[in-house]
Image (cartoon, rainbow, N blue to C red):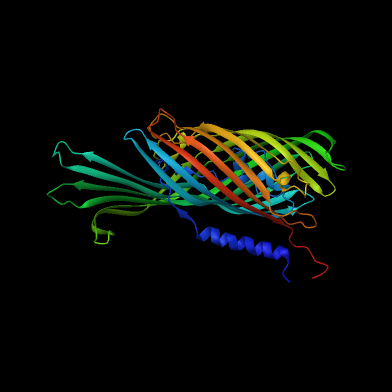
Amino acid sequence: MQSTSTIYRASFFLICIIFITSVSAQENSPYSRFGLGDFTYSQHVVTKAMGGVAVAYADGQIVNFSNPASYANLKIVTYDLGITIDSRTLRSNTPLSKYNSTNFSPTYLSVGFPIDKMKNIGASFGFRPITRINYSVVKSERLSSVSSNDSIQTGFEGSGGMNQFYFGLGKKWKNGLSIGFNSGYNFGKRESNTKRAFINDTVAFYKSNYSTTTSFGGMFVSGGFQFETLLDSSKGYRKGMKDKYYLRLGANASLGQKLNASQNISKETYEYDNSGGIFKVDSVFSSSNNKGSITIPTTYTAGALIQKTASDASGVYDIWTFGAEFTTAKWSEYRFYNQADALINTWQVRVGGSWVPDPKSFDNYFSRINYKAGFNFGKDYINADGKELKTYGVSFGLGLPVRPARFSYQFTTIHTAFEYGKRGSAVNNITENYFKLSFALSISDIWFIKRKYD
């Protein structure tokens, strides 16, 4: 008979295959035209639900890749898979218009595992998207100098984004200090097309297309630390349990890097066939394999968190957490083939927490649910109209245990996060409201155990 452990692992990898092959995107954000696109902020869904508070957070049953120092807390093999449904509403003042779009995308796929439990050494590896580029904007202009009936229609289209494969290690000492690092490979593609059509009632003109495709990639390094200290301890709410209160400080730095890039440029005329497809009429200019680089700045994050736990002979259980953090990056230093973009230095403040009424309750499921909430505010790194983009967001979520552990070391939890926010304010011509619904599946299990009975 197959063990439950084997079934869980097989189910997880089956979900991963479906997860990778069923992604579809319908998003259209004109802001993703700048820099490397819109950041996906692919944190773990647990920390997303807490307003994004992650740098000081540690949990032995999830992979918190926002700070690799947290890997030291991993005690069992953990699989994490996250997806997000992103619904956005764009509003423009001039011209007055409104546009809705929906996007379904992966947020991360990661595995965490202990290397040495006695020495508190853990590791993780995985994949996650970092930015996303997807926009289509049409601009129409009347040519008054030629004829009142003539006009030019220009379309700006783009796609692509940056993704990341990572591997990290974390180590914790008895004094409560943990350090860790992530390293791996950032890679992606940025495709942009500028299509222009001269519209005339009597004369037919070929349409033009200016296309640029840039492929890039490079190694990255990030490092972080966490420091945990016991504030107080007391007799627990249940017999045989002990309550403890901790303060945990955390910080992380994702070092700046230069991505190696290769660019293909094409200028051509085109037309549409009878089925609506595009065919090239003539090539005006073509250049391939143009080498260059993309400069990304360092990102710094620091925060603090207070946590209450309850422990007994069977384990340690989180009761509540509350924390805040601050992150910043000098995106004014960004360069794309030595050219600056409409980017500015960014910052964000995040505040949030979680609460479990009674993690040991087996007769009341709602008491075992982990309730989370938080908010954030700051300034986006894109400065398209020169008036900055303020950002605001609120979130809440649930950690839903699928089955009680009781006599097993297998833990399965479904995490959810609901986020609502806004980018831009009354001073901006285009503002963006978003609603994100995120789901994550966390499966923890113990591997490499020699069984006494098969």
Residue 31: % across, % down: 41, 40
Residue 5: % across, % down: 72, 63
Above or below for 6 versus 209:
below
Q: In which quarter of the image is the C terminus?
A: bottom right
In terms of depth relative to the viewer, which is nearer, 71 or 7? 7
Image check: 78 left or right of 142? right
Residue 330: % across, % down: 50, 34
In terms of depth relative to the viewer, which is nearer, 39 or 263? 39
In terms of depth relative to the viewer, which is nearer, 111 or 343? 111
Image check: 93 left or right of 343? left
User: Quadrant of residue 152 in the image?
Assistant: top left
Residue 242 visible in the shown view: yes
Tell which residue pokes out farthest to the front in this image: 363
Tell which residue pokes out farthest to the right in this image: 240
Residue 76: % across, % down: 73, 54
Residue 186 visible in the shown view: no
Label total for image: 0
Q: In which quarter of the image is the N terminus?
A: bottom right
Residue found 74% across the figure and 42% down from its top = 318
Image check: 4 left or right of 396? right
